[in-house]
Image: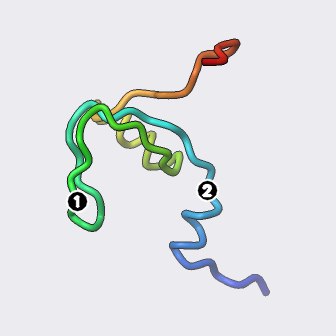
Amino acid sequence: MAEAKTPAETAKAEKKAPIRLLYDTWADDEKRIPAGTVLEVPVSAAKELLANGKAERADPLPGDDA
């Protein structure tokens, strides 16, 4: 039988994506993250922030090496 993963293990295993915040956001520890900050977040969180208009993708276009 497979062991159940804790939420922390699941988040660690989930692929991450870079996003740029469009609005100030508060982290789980109640610290403010200012707009314009680029973060690596789990894909599920990135999709939610993108869908809500709170962030934009921050990954380079194919062929960009900058």
Q: Secondary structure at mark 1?
A: loop
Q: Secondary structure at mark 2?
A: loop
CA distance for labels 1 and 2: 23 Å
Say which amino acid is labelled 2: Glu
Q: Quadrant of the C terminus?
A: top right
* Rendering coords of residue 29 (x, y %): 27, 67
Look at the image and tell me in which quarter the N terminus lies: bottom right
Residue for point 51% across, 73% down: 7
Residue 14, labelled with which disc? 2
Up-down relation of residue 3 to residue 32 (above or below): below
Residue, x 50% and y 37% (percent of image)?
18
Q: Nearer the viewer, residue 32 or 49?
A: 32
Residue 36: x percent and y percent?
30, 31
Query: How many numbered marks are there?
Result: 2
Report which residue position mark 1 lands on: 31
Left or right placement of residue 8 versus residue 56 in this view: right
Residue at x-position 25% and y-position 35%: 35
Examine the image and state in which quarter residue 12 appears: bottom right
Horizontal side, residue 55 vs residue 19: left or right: left
